[in-house]
Amino acid sequence: MPKRINFGKLIEKQLPAELVNFMWVAGEIAHTRGEKLYLVGGVVRDLLLGQANLDLDLVVEGNAIELAQQLKKINKGKITTHPRFNTAKLQWDNWSVDLATARSETYDKPGALPTVKPSSIDDDLSRRDFTINAMAIGLNPGYYGRPVDPHGGRDDLKSKLIRVLHGQSFTDDATRIWRGLRYEQRLDFHLERKTLKLLQRDIPMLDTISADRIRYEVECILKEKYPEKVFRRAEELEVLPKLHPALKGNGWLAERFEQARKLSFPALPEVGLYLALLAYPLTSEETERLISRLRLPKSLAQNLRDTIALKGKMRLLATPGLSPSGIYRLLAPYSSPAMVANSLATESPAASQNIHMYLTRLKYIEISLTGDDLMRLGVAPGPHIREIIELLHKARLDGKITSKQDEVDLVKGWLAAKQMK
Ligand code: ATP
């Protein structure tokens, strides 16, 4: 038996007073409505682990939208409701709380979204992914701080185990495979023996999951502190090939992710940079398959295409004596994350330095004269304008001119040469 924990105290100790007060009031209002309110899911897990988590998920045995509307009157926040799912989000100041109606779920078909019905907290916990995420804490007066842990979540937290609630869990929803690896690696836990077997058995079920849901899981992984650990484990368990068979979760990737973090510090690397490094070993055909498996939005897809296209230009980019304007011409068509990814991935220090030069200096170089200025100087409107602008820009990049006056002189020289012809 786990030792008795005073959850009320735990909440007060770990959560900001404003959220604690909110939960008190919410529990009292639910009580007056004859409903029971609970704090559930990840935040309960993290309270027990002593880790910060301010994403409050509340579940009510009753009507979440009506309760949220009543709560909104008190904290004067914003409310967003989803009547189809009977859920609501309350936002005020910097806080955000999700409220859901306790529900049961049945899966008509693997991978499809479940049919849901209002139900009890026990049913609501039984539909969840892992025991450590299937705990709740009562918030009503008289129940405040009372734990609800029907699946042994606290025992599993102590033993550092990720365990599904039943044998059909991964079949019902194979996104739980990715979720399981993510929690295992984030928390430094282990997949419980039977859960591991079920996971391996159900890897083919990942094919039943829509692109949007898989992309969401990949994005969640890329927001982890060490996404490479999840990809390494996914390779080991042969889950990674379900994203694309040519992807690698090896030491090379881990080193590049680490470098990407150093480069982006104190922020985290953008998803686009991580994805570009992950996709780096792929050919352009393979990249297209990954893009469609994840139905990547336009900019992320373009970023991957740029990464692979630029990979093919790295030899040229390493050419000794390449001029700044030559570097500019090679790199300008590509996105910044694609350049950074190539710079981290290349074996060529020269190519990497040239990318650095582009990103820190060349891309900011502009000319001073405008099209109107050029016409005032006597350049005829039409294609010549563009030609001269490019000439000026090239001269600026290569340091041949450095001031507005230099630009004027160059234009005058160009016009004179034109007249001589
Ligand atoms: P994180 O720390 O990654 O945000 P979380 O536990 O808060 O973790 P969410 O994805 O926000 O995770 O989901 C909230 C809760 O909903 C989970 O704790 C879990 O109980 C449940 N849940 C989420 N996704 C699933 C799923 N695919 N199957 C079953 N239960 C799920």
Image: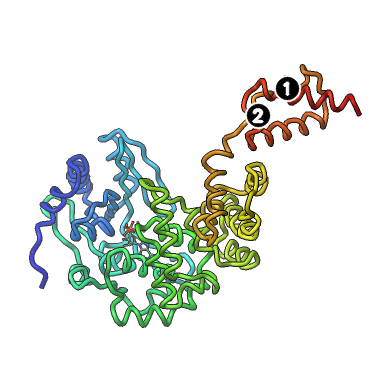
Farthest residue to the front: give it.
321
Q: Is 192 drawn above or below residue 404 in the view shown?
A: below
Query: Disc 1 designates what residue?
Result: 409
The quadrant in which the N terminus is found is bottom left
**In-front residue for pair 17/187:** 187
Image quarter where ligand 1 lies: bottom left
Report which quarter residue 363 is drawn in: top right
Q: Position of residue 10 (x, y in %)?
A: 13, 53
Circle 2 crowding by C-alpha within 10 Å: few under 14, some 14–19, many from 20: some
Q: Is mark 2 within 8 Å of ligand 1?
A: no
Which element is circle 2 on? loop
Q: Is disc 2 in contact with disc 1, using a CB cutoff of under 8 Å?
A: yes
**In the image shown, does 220 or 418 lie closer to the viewer?**
418
Residue 236 position within the rendered picture, expressed as x and y whole percent measured from the top left:
41, 77
Q: CA distance from mark 2 to mark 1?
A: 10 Å
Q: From the image, which quarter does the C terminus lie in? A: top right
Q: Residue at x 27, y 62 (%)?
A: 120
Check residue 401 in the rendering and tell me which mark sits there, or answer none. 2
Residue at point 27% right, 52% down? 58
Kind of residue at badge 2: Ile
Relative image position of residue 166 (x, y in whole percent) = 32, 77
